Image (cartoon, helix red, strand yellow):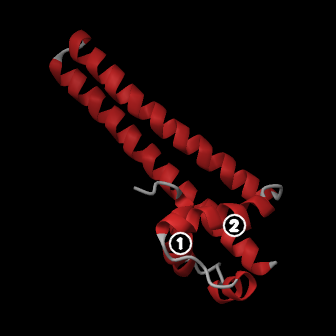
Amino acid sequence: KYPYPGCRAFTYYGPRSMSVDMVSLERKYGPLPTRLKEQNPFWNHQLYLTLTGTAPVAQAHRLFLFARDYSFMSLVMLVGFGIAASFTMPATTAVAYALLLFAQWVLAANAARVGGQRLVTIVLARSAGQ
């Protein structure tokens, strides 16, 4: 329902990261939102947009966007090439090929998830330290 990594910034990623000082964030920004719907706008407008020009945040954002887009492309390839393989290859080869495409999608989706978490925690850590 709330797919953005910033939706869990203050209730999940921040408290679980050793590099984020949640007490400092609360002292600096007041009470932090706890509802998922409110966390992403606060994280985005109050924290992320003030740090977009810094090298670590820009690099983490680029890597997250790349992994997210690659995950989507690998899903499209899984469906498209998987169907095409079922018509053009022997059954065992097509199944093996589809499994490899599925593994690619799983790895790419995991990379996108971790990249989003990394982006959120970098922004939180740098915001707490300023």
* Pointer 1 residue: 13
Q: For residue 83, what is the image quadrant?
A: top left
Q: Quick check: can you spot residue 117?
A: no
Q: Secondary structure at mark 2?
A: helix
The percent coordinates of residue 87 (x first, y second) are: 22, 11
Dot 1 or dot 2, earlier in sequence: 1
Neighbour tally class for label 1: few under 14, some 14-19, many 20 plus, Cα within 10 Å: some
* Pointer 2 residue: 123
Closer-to-camera residue (129/7):
7
Q: Amino acid at mark 1?
A: Tyr
Q: Residue at x 65, y 89 (%)?
A: 23
Q: Amino acid at mark 2?
A: Val
Q: Quick check: can you spot residue 96?
A: yes
Which quadrant would the N terminus be assigned to in this image? bottom left
Q: Residue at x 59, y 81 (%)?
A: 18
Q: For residue 31, what is the image quadrant?
A: bottom right
Give the tally of numbered discs. 2
